[in-house]
Image (tube, rainbow, N blue to C red):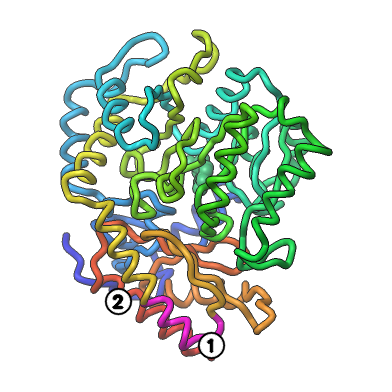
């Protein structure tokens, strides 16, 4: 199978898709969001084919997962080879080679020229839970601070640190009681009505002057967790000096800085990890998503001296399976060999400049922001920047009907995170679909 572009043969969802969606709704948990009625059958590169033969161009990579495109042949070969050797021994009780080999490969890319250790798990939420537990175990402090509009996952620990949307929290309270929140520098919609840089990083004062003086003692704070680029919150990039100041404050107060790179990691932002854009070296980094090409994988990587918990403190039966880690090894090998990260940076610049052009023709585009191929486009109704959620949702539906997969983020943004191997021509195809849709709304 080889696709040359998006192709709609039957208005989606076609008859087969409709049948499966009905069956799915009858059987699966209704808690799943389901952005578009795509019933995927097969995929290759930047394309996904549905059960009715429609082919979609993928501008979301299943939320930044298929960085190398769908079903990269080298990763498939690595998985097949490992299937013939060893699928499982539990890594609580025994040792396997891929776990050791992968650690060395990954450590080279994690910011910080210090000795590191890794804990493997199966998802982004688990990586975040691992980081939270590790920070508490190491510091023996109780509080954790997160950022408003931050997303860290759905396990009870991760959702306790997540504040993108009350829908994820409703009914589950009281949350993990250690969590406190401070404002993220979402400069396009500053919570304090100020402007960067004349604000002098006013939002940082909330941490130092309110949180640490009135709410939680810094010496009882184990960690601050932050996405170096907010993902589900809307692909929001903080000022470099904000992240640097945060790293300084946490170091000074003995608080561990956790960079949640579940979405921004593995080349997505044009650097292997987004923390490098800010010149910071977090104490703990969480990763998942693009880790193993869509197989369930996650990890928390920390400075070696932080991972000082005792045997039995934290483990998991299926963690770091050999098939998954052979896939992960090949993901890194291909990324290094094919200079995927540099490519993401260059393609990202092109993509952003096209989107900025599009913004000049479409006043409904309030903001275009991002790093590498992690780009957010925020839609507004008017000059007061009223969020245009309906327009955003309609765009996702209309683009889908024309063969383009888009994902939402924040209140009225789309997150553009195509596979890092996407070509300019493929980007142009997707961009013209978006522009065609926007023309209808003018
Ligand atoms: C930054 C971040 N952290 C954690 C998670 C949770 O990952 P998972 O869905 O694999 O549990 C996500 C998922 O979108 C994420 O974007």
| Crowding near the residue tagged with mark 2, few <14, some 14–19, many ≥20 C-alpha atoms within 10 Å | some
Q: Quadrant of the N terminus?
A: bottom left
Read off the magenta span.
Answer: 354-364
Q: Residue furthest right?
A: 214
The count of marks equals: 2
Q: Nearer the viewer, residue 294 or 33?
A: 294
Question: Which residue is pictured at 37% across the width and 59% down the height?
Answer: 372
Comparing 387 with 274, the one in front is: 274
**Percent position of residue 355, x then y:** 41, 76
Which residue position is annotated with label 1?
441
Find out if the beta carbon at label 2 lies less than 8 Å from the nearest ligand 1 atom: no
Residue at 34% across, 50% down: 271
How many other residues sit within 10 Å of disc 1, few (<14), some (14-19) or many (≥20)?
A: few
Q: From the viewer's perspective, is 351 left or right of 152?
A: left
Q: Classify 308 as above or below 141.
A: above
Classified by dominant secondary structure, the portion drawn in magenta counts as helix
Residue 247 placement (x, y as % from top left): 55, 39
On whether residue 306 falls in the magenta region, the answer is: no
Q: Position of residue 257 (x, y in %)?
A: 56, 35
Place residue 272 in its image quadrant: top left
Regarding residue 295, the answer to whether it shows in the image is yes
Secondary structure type for disc 2 = helix
Q: Which residue occupies the foreground of this view, 205 or 47?
A: 205
Which numbered marker is on residue 429? 2
Q: Residue at x 59, y 43 (%)?
A: 246
C-beta proximity under 8 Å, tags 2 and 1: no
């Amino acid at each position: 199978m080889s696709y040359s572009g998006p192709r709609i043969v039957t208005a989606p969802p076609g008859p087969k898709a409709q049948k499966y969606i009905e069956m799915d709704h009858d059987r699966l948990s209704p808690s799943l969001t389901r952005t578009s009625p795509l019933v995927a059958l097969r995929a290759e590169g930047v394309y996904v084919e549905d059960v009715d033969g429609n082919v979609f161009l993928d501008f979301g990579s299943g939320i930044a997962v298929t960085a190398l495109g769908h079903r990269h042949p080298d990763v498939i070969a690595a998985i097949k080879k490992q299937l013939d050797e060893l699928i499982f021994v539990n890594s609580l009780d025994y040792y396997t080679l891929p776990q050791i080999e992968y650690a060395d490969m990954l450590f080279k890319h994690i910011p910080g020229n210090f000795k590191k250790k890794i804990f493997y798990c199966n998802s982004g939420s688990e990586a975040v839970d691992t980081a939270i537990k590790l920070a508490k175990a190491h510091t023996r402090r109780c509080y954790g601070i997160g950022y408003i509009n931050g997303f860290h996952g759905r396990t009870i620990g991760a959702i306790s640190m997540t504040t993108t949307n009350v829908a994820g929290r409703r009914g589950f309270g009281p949350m993990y009681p250690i969590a406190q929140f401070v404002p993220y520098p979402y400069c396009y919609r500053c919570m304090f009505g100020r402007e960067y840089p004349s604000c002098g990083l006013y939002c940082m004062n909330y941490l130092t002057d309110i949180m640490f003086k009135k709410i939680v003692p810094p010496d009882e704070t184990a960690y601050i967790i932050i996405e170096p680029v907010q993902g589900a919150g809307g692909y929001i990039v903080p000022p470099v000096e904000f992240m640097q100041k945060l790293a300084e404050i946490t170091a000074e107060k003995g608080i561990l800085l956790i960079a949640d790179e579940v979405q921004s990691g593995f080349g997505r932002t044009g650097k292997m990890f987004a923390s490098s854009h800010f010149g910071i070296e977090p104490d703990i980094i969480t990763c998942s998503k693009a880790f193993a090409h869509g197989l369930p994988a996650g990890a928390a990587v920390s400075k070696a001296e932080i991972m000082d918990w005792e045997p039995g403190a934290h483990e998991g039966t299926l963690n770091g399976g050999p098939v998954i880690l052979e896939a992960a090894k090949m993901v890194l090998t291909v990324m290094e060999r094919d200079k995927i990260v540099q490519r993401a940076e260059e393609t990202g610049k092109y993509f952003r400049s096209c989107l900025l052009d599009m913004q000049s023709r479409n006043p409904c585009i309030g903001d275009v922001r991002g790093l590498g191929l992690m780009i957010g486009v925020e839609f507004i109704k008017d000059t007061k920047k009223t969020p245009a959620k309906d327009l955003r949702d309609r765009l996702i539906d209309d683009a889908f009907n024309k063969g383009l997969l888009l994902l939402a983020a924040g209140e009225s943004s789309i997150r553009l995170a195509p596979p890092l191997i996407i070509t300019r021509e493929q980007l142009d195809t997707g961009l013209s679909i978006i522009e065609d849709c926007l023309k209808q709304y003018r």
